[in-house]
Image (cartoon, rainbow, N blue to C red):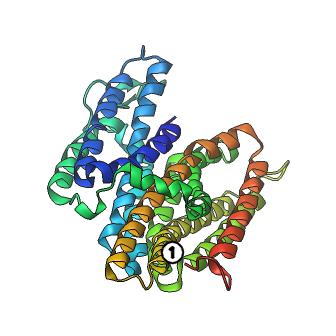
Amino acid sequence: MPGITGGTARIFYTFLGPRIGQRRFTALSTVVLIVPLLWLGFAVQDTSTSYTTMVAIAALCGIGGANFSSSLANIGFFYPKQEKGNATGINGGLGNLGVSVVQLLTPILITSSVLAIGAGQKKANGSEIYLQNAAFVWVPVLIVLPVIAWFGQNDLKVASTPFSRQEIIFKRKRTWLMTWPYVGTFGSFIGFAAALPLLIKTTFPAYSVATYAWMGPALGALARWAGGWIADKLGGARVTILSFAGLAASIIGVITFLPVGSDQGSFQGFFLCFLAAFFFSGVGNGSTFRQIPVIFRDQHMRAAEGQGPAAQDAAMKQSEMEAGAVTGFSSAIAAYGFFFIPAMFAGMAVTNALWLFIGFYAACLAVCWWFYARKGAEAPS
């Protein structure tokens, strides 16, 4: 449910930020997240809370993921071409660290009576846990961050754009071509982050989910930072192609180490290959976000070539606006991986699902090579 609402809200958030002003929008869209967290904290303390109520809370919590698209749509305006990959990599890498931070801290928080607000819940063995801690601990953070955004960010007049001007991206071929590989990178990252705990629990039940599950998202988030920086040096398309080759090889490794029949498989091999998959998905996250502004900038500047400084300035502004909108939109579509990848593992054999991912990575690599990396490509990036 959070994957569905988060991905859908990202589409709207991509276009709302530039329309309202990023400073105001960031502050408002952050402070409203206090509501579902407070609701969740009280709901988990009441055993009469219905499943429908929990679904509604989950849906509202998922909207928090949409803030990512609005920040990505804005950040490109602050940096020149040669620094865009690093800037979006840092923004995305630090943002995505939230996945691993929550997975790491939640088991600790819910067993800590020191932070508890309200009564604990009795477990079957007589010990107490404090489920509300997992929600309430973030409320102070969500009070401080909007204040920082309000006084520390900039609405940027140059970034203020009505939707009537942003909607042009849906007619651009490059929008859809770049959304494809970004779904392959970020969709894999967020989907594997959601599915890995369940895969460990069902495939290698002797190993602790809490001990291992957070490591993959942490590595992927940090690799995203590195991917943007490397793409600035080597070129985004080259790095993206390498990331898809690495993803495919990593998932083949995961399949190799899965239990089959009487063979118990190898958790160490399985987990290391999944870590590699997170790493390459993070690298690809960073490199695709470097590609988008470069592609749109080059396209618009070529069209304005020889038309004078005023036309070139207008082309630059239009390219920045479109690149920001495409960046946010592609991340919105990719965010549905949080829903679809766990659903695939639940609905079919794990091995079959993994082979489908490998086929998809091959298609993404082909698209990236043909349109952006080969000699004579339409839009080298």
**Residue pushed farthest front?**
307
Mark yes or no: residue 149 visible: yes
**Residue pushed farthest right?**
261
Horizontal side of residue 11 vs 115, given as left or right: right
Q: Residues within 10 Å of mark 1 (few under 14, many from 20)?
A: some
Horizontal side of residue 297 vs 346, given as left or right: left
**Residue pushed farthest left?**
151
Instruction: Name the foreground residue: 304 vs 265.
Output: 304
Whether residue 52 is situated above or below residue 258 in the rendered picture: above
Residue under the image location 29 percent in, 31 percent down: 35
The amino acid pointed to by label 1 is: Gln
**Residue pushed farthest top?**
48
Q: How many marks?
A: 1
Residue under the image location 71 percent in, 56 percent down: 357
Q: Which residue is mark 1?
A: 299
Residue under the image location 85 percent in, 48 percent down: 261
Whether residue 247 is situated above or below residue 136 in the rendered picture: below
Residue under the image location 29 percent in, 24 percent down: 119
Horizontal side of residue 371 vs 264, given as left or right: left
Horizontal side of residue 122 vs 139, given as left or right: right
Whether residue 370 is situated above or below residue 93 in the rendered picture: below
Instruction: Name the foreground residue: 205 vs 352.
Output: 352
Mark yes or no: residue 69 visible: no
The percent coordinates of residue 260 (x first, y second) are 82, 51
The percent coordinates of residue 65 (x first, y second) are 42, 46
The percent coordinates of residue 327 (x first, y second) are 46, 60
The quadrant of the rendering that contains the C terminus is bottom right
The percent coordinates of residue 380 (x first, y second) are 58, 80
Instruction: Name the foreground residue: 192 vs 70.
Output: 70
Q: Secondary structure at mark 1?
A: helix
